[in-house]
Amino acid sequence: MRFNREVDIPCDVPRREHTLQRIRQERAQARAWLVEYSQFFKAGMRLPEGEPEGSNLLYADTKAYMTHRELADLEALFTRQYVSNLGNEAVKAHRIAAAQLGLAPYRGKILRDPSQTAEAFSLDRRATHLLVRMGFVQAIFEQCGRQSVVHGILRWSPASASVVCRSRIRLLPYGHCAGDVRMG
């Protein structure tokens, strides 16, 4: 098999609409969990601003929720791989899963490592992780009374395969598929 082949997964608008509905359902499920179990909200905490480390309680809530949803392994893997090497196979597999959900197009090399989509790392499970994580984050912002987080504009750089972190994130995903990844 040639590993230097390109794959192009365009954004599928009908698939995206279905995905957005699933994210709304995940947000409702996460909201209920936060009300019942969140240590962050029970302690009366507010979203940290200007703190590079964030909140330990919010981090603990994220780990607990991902464990509750049986996705802690993917959360840990993706986080570790994303931070250490944005272009690696684990991150690429998540990008392909996002494209299959209709959230963003994918254009890049095929996966070289078949273990990245085997068993617990299947593209379906990765898609579930993305949906659950997006719903959870949106529920946190919603619980904090935030309708949006404004920081500029989110841009995708295909040349470097990285996201330039200047983003405007609103609570409900919408927009067109060509890189408009706003939530609101």
Image (cartoon, rainbow, N blue to C red):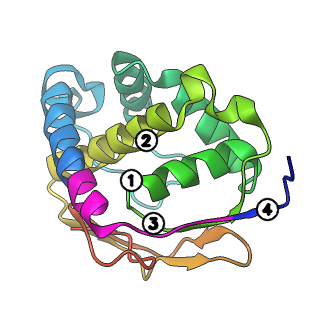
Residue 7 on image: x %, y % = 66, 63
Residue 76 colored magenta? no
Viewed as shown, does residue 173 lie left or right of 154? left
User: Circles 4 and 2: CB distance less than 8 Å?
Assistant: no
Query: Label for residue 101?
Result: 1
Task: Magenta stretch: give its range.
Answer: 7-20
State the residue in front, 136 or 180.
180
Query: Label for residue 104?
Result: 3
Q: Secondary structure at mark 4?
A: loop
Snapshot quadrant of residue 58: top left
Is residue 141 visible to the viewer in this orientation of the structure? no
Q: Quadrant of the C terminus?
A: bottom left
Mark 4 lies on residue: 5
Query: Label for residue 33?
Result: none
Snapshot quadrant of residue 70: top left
Under mark 4, the amino acid is: Arg
Viewed as shown, does residue 170 lie left or right of 92? left
Comparing labels 4 and 2, the label whose residue is closer to the camera: 4
Q: Residue at x 38, y 41 (%)?
A: 133
Vertical side of 157 occupied by 55: above or below: above
Under mark 3, the amino acid is: Ala
Residue 152 on image: x %, y % = 42, 82
Report, in whole angstroms, how far the alpha carbon at label 3 lies from the one at label 1: 8 Å
Q: Earlier in the sequence, mark 1 or mark 2?
A: 1
Residue 90 on image: x %, y % = 68, 42
User: Circles 1 and 2: CB distance less than 8 Å?
Assistant: yes
Q: Secondary structure at mark 1?
A: loop
Residue 11 colored magenta? yes
User: Circles 1 and 4: CB distance less than 8 Å?
Assistant: no
Comparing labels 1 and 4, the label whose residue is closer to the camera: 4
